[in-house]
């Protein structure tokens, strides 16, 4: 158990170094000096099928529409996390095409009761096939055309990357 905790600490420090070295774009509120943030790297997907984008609607006491994705667990790579999260939140199997970028977002995560510095790795993926309904509770997969997707995405960084992707498509 002690070794696992030490590995998690080393992993978090590596993520922090990557963030500061890359000087990546930040979205949302700026970090506060009086708050200690937990580094939470994650992998998120712009999943396309034809002219439509697959999104997830999450009910966490309120509804929020997001790009499918989530946290990268210790010992897990970004692509492994991306496949797992996309399936859990949408029920779809995906095929990653390319990495689009990365951004930071300082947020309160009520499901973990902690402040987090989310490091969001964004990928373009193709929807391969629907395997099931979402297996993660309180998630619903929704397909939207590009204009609607940009309008309903709640997270500023998600909207930025989707907009950039659509302009460069």
Image: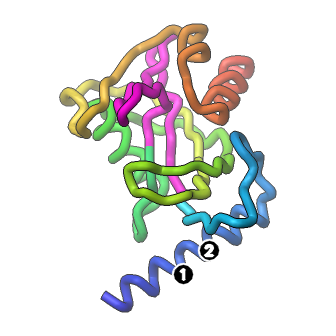
What residue sits 25% from the left and 39% below the top?
136
Instruction: State the count of labels.
Output: 2
Q: Residue 109 versus residue 134: which sits nearer the camera?
A: 109
In the rendered view, tell whether residue 101 sits above or below residue 9.
above
Mark 1: which secondary structure?
helix
How far across and down, in percent of the image, does residue 57 sit? 39, 25
Magenta extent: 41-69
Residue tagged 2: 14
Q: Is residue 59 magenta?
A: yes
Identify the image quadrant of the C terminus: top right
Queried whether the magenta region covers residue 135, the answer comes back as no
The residue positioned 49% from the left and 30% from the top of the image is: 66
Q: Is residue 128 visible?
A: yes
Q: Nearer the viewer, residue 43 or 100?
A: 43
Front position in the image: 44 or 49: 44
Residue 69, located in which quarter of the rendered image?
top left
Q: Which residue is mark 1?
A: 10
Residue 44 lies left or right of residue 94; in this view the side is right
Q: Position of residue 109 (x, y in %)?
A: 48, 50
Q: Residue at x 38, y 34 (%)?
A: 94
Q: Residues within 10 Å of mark 2 (few under 14, many from 20)?
A: few
Toward which corner of the image does residue 124 lie, by quadrant?
A: top right
């Amino acid at each position: 158990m002690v070794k696992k905790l030490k590995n998690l600490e080393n992993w978090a420090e590596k993520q922090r170094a990557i963030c500061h070295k890359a000087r990546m774009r930040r979205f949302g509120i700026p970090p506060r000096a009086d708050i200690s943030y937990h580094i939470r790297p994650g992998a998120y997907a712009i999943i396309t099928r034809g002219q439509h984008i697959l999104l997830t609607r999450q009910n966490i006491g309120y509804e929020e529409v997001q790009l499918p994705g989530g946290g990268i667990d210790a010992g897990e790579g970004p692509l492994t996390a991306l496949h797992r999260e996309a399936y859990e939140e949408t029920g779809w199997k995906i095929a990653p095409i390319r990495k689009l970028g990365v951004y930071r977002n300082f947020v309160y995560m009520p499901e973990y009761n902690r402040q987090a510095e989310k490091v969001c790795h964004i990928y373009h993926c193709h929807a391969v096939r629907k395997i099931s309904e979402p297996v993660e509770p309180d998630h619903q997969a929704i397909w939207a055309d590009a204009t609607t997707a940009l309008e309903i995405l709640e997270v500023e960084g998600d909207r930025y990357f989707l907009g950039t992707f659509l302009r460069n498509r």
